[in-house]
Image (cartoon, rainbow, N blue to C red):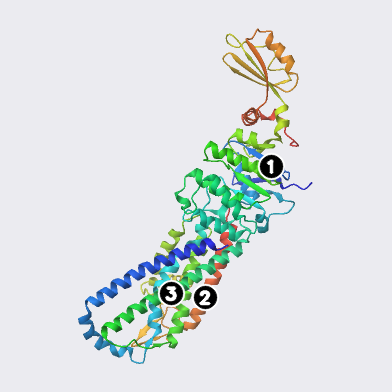
């Protein structure tokens, strides 16, 4: 099957600084891929290179199997991280601009979206709040009914109600066959919407896989003790335990296989409670970016 | 594709018409308040209208205002660099977009010229009415043609040079426009300076090749008529040749601007 988005060996350097290093990422048609990473991880640079706003130092891209050309943008919508709207123009004028630029522009859909986000058409965009500007950018993008969305922090500045609306729009678009590659700092949003997640750290892809698969790769065994958590001999060196967190009376062990055996080890020290939990995306993210990421498996990365 | 630029130019032209209209209105009110003295003075200048009014004079005023307008709108591509995600993710080639900008702006420059000439004509009609004379017939003399071609060419050349320099900048088009006024004015002034050593003068003449004002100053008054055949500019060239050079430089500057704009990264 042809990938909707294929990034191969992307490297982008600015002088001595490497913003993105050997990044390869493929997004399948109809899927939602969340790109996570701390500030400066290279998410926006990846998007800019993908869309021709920056030239990659090396690497290649394909959108629906083809190199990027102006015609690609007929079927691709991009929402940048920072507002890139014309401040002196009204929302109505922005919509008119899009109507003139895109054959796919759907005026009825645009009208629905304006109603959903409760915006005034005749107000100049420069007078909108940050969140409202994000909403304008989203209205413009979704009114095109594109096959591919590239959304950089699409819910930035929006209140929780509209954040939920954005997620719903993304899920609805993907259900209709659209492909979505988006970045977010809000892991909850990614967890809810994405069926695939890629995590960047210092420009390098450290995790790439389906959200469900990643969640099942490990379990968290959490033990709560009556007093300060004891030192458990050999736990740190146990090959099944990838990471240990201590916080007062609580000990958490991130266990790849055999969580039952680790529960038994904890029970030898008479804890008040021992719980086995599934890994959350937040755990996956924090593990990946806190310097101990090498032990997390990820897709087809070496 | 050029809808945003059309809106921008519409706004600029409305401003131009508003400001010029207000100035013309003030001039007309002032003329009407001093109508008594005006009758006497017009008696002396009446002979100027004998044989009709040469459009060269009207075009001269139009070109002067248009020149200012053209420089003000020169930072178009630079302004687009402030919101690159908007313009550069549209389904059009960047060359095509830049060309549409240039053509829209050129149309606005021509409209600015027409608006200026129209407003000045209204003032002239008012002057005739106050003086109690019939409006003189308009005469399209040979000088009018060259003023139109060279003058608008100079305006467009200035616009295009500002575009060429500022297109590769993320914003700061206004700064380039401001500096261009200082640079071109000083440069054309230095071309007439006699105290400079020969090699410095040569260098200044070379720099003046890309100075729109250096081409424009050749049009001077000779008694009651304007002369374009006397090569009295810093370049000893016929005015029509200067006009051709000015338009050629304008086109070349637009090509450079497009290249600079296209290769910019964000």
Label 3, secondary structure: give it: helix
Mark 2 = which residue? B247
| Upstream in sequence: badge 2 or badge 3 | 3
Which numbered dot is residue B31? Answer: none
> Do marks 2 and 3 share a chain?
yes
- Quadrant in the picture for residue B12: bottom left
The disc numbered 2 marks a residue on which chain?
B
Q: Nearer the viewer, mark 3 or mark 1?
A: 3
**Residue A27 drawn above or below residue B64:** above
Mark 3 = which residue? B113
Q: Residue lying at the far left in this picture: please name it.
A: B36
**Residue A267 drawn above or below residue B263:** above
Front-most of B265 and B37?
Answer: B37
The disc numbered 1 marks a residue on which chain?
A
Q: CA distance from mark 2 to mark 3?
A: 17 Å
For the N terminus of chain B, the quadrant is bottom right
Number of marks in the rendered image: 3
> Do marks 3 and 1 share a chain?
no
Q: Nearer the viewer, mark 2 or mark 3?
A: 3
Label 2, secondary structure: give it: helix
Q: CA distance from mark 1 to mark 2?
A: 48 Å
Q: Residue at position x 68%, y 12% from top?
A: A266
The reply to whether dot 2 and dot 3 touch (C-beta < 8 Å) is no
Label 1, secondary structure: give it: strand
The disc numbered 3 marks a residue on which chain?
B
Mark 1 = which residue? A23
């Amino acid at each position: 099957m042809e990938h909707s988005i294929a990034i191969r060996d992307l490297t982008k350097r600015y002088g001595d600084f490497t913003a993105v290093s050997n990044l390869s990422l493929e997004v399948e048609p109809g899927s939602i891929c969340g790109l996570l990473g701390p500030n400066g991880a290279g998410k926006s640079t990846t998007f800019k290179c993908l869309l021709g706003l920056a030239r990659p130092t090396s690497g290649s891209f394909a959108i629906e199997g083809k190199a990027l050309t102006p015609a690609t943008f007929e079927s691709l919508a991009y929402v940048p991280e920072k507002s890139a709207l014309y401040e002196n123009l009204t929302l109505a004028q922005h919509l008119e601009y899009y109507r003139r630029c895109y054959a796919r522009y759907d005026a009825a859909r645009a009208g629905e979206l304006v109603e959903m986000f409760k915006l005034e058409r005749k107000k100049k965009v420069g007078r909108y709040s940050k969140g409202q500007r994000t909403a304008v950018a989203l209205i413009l993008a979704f009114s095109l009914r594109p096959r591919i969305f590239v959304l950089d922090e699409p819910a930035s500045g929006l209140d929780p109600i509209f954040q939920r609306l954005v997620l719903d729009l993304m899920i609805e678009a993907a259900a209709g066959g659209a492909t979505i590659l988006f970045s977010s700092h809000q892991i909850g949003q990614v967890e809810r919407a994405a069926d695939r997640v890629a995590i960047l750290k210092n420009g390098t892809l450290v995790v790439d896989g389906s959200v469900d698969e990643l969640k099942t790769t490990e379990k968290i065994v959490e033990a709560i003790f009556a007093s300060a958590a004891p030192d458990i001999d050999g736990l740190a060196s146990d090959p099944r335990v990838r990471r240990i967190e201590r916080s007062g009376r609580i000990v958490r062990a991130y266990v790849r296989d055999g969580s039952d055996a680790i529960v038994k080890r904890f029970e030898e020290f008479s804890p008040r409670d021992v719980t086995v939990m599934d890994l959350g995306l937040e755990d996956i993210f924090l593990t990946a970016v806190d310097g101990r990421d090498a032990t997390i498996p990820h897709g087809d990365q070496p | 594709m050029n809808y945003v630029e059309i809106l921008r130019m519409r706004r600029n032209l409305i401003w131009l018409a508003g400001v010029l209209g207000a100035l013309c209105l003030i001039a007309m009110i002032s003329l009407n308040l001093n109508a008594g003295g005006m009758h006497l003075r017009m008696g002396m200048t009446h002979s100027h209208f004998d044989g009709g009014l040469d459009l060269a004079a009207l075009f001269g005023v139009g070109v002067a205002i248009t020149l200012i307008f053209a420089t003000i709108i020169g930072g178009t591509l630079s302004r687009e660099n402030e919101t690159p995600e908007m313009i550069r993710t549209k389904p059009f080639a960047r060359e095509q977009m830049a060309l549409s900008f240039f053509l829209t702006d050129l149309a606005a420059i021509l409209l600015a010229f027409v608006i200026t000439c129209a407003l000045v004509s209204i003032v002239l009609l008012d002057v005739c009415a106050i003086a109690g004379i019939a409006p003189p017939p308009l005469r399209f003399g040979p000088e009018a043609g060259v003023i139109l071609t060279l003058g608008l060419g100079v305006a467009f050349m200035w616009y295009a040079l500002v575009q060429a320099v500022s297109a590769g900048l993320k914003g700061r088009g206004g700064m380039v426009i401001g500096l261009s006024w200082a640079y071109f004015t000083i440069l054309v002034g230095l071309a007439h300076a006699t105290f400079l050593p020969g090699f410095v003068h040569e260098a200044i003449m070379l720099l003046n090749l890309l100075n729109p004002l250096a081409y424009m100053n050749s049009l001077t008054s000779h008694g009651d008529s304007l002369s374009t055949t006397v090569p009295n500019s810093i370049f000893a060239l016929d005015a029509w040749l200067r006009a051709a050079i000015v338009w050629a430089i304008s086109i070349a500057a637009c090509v450079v601007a497009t290249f600079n704009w296209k290769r910019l990264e964000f």
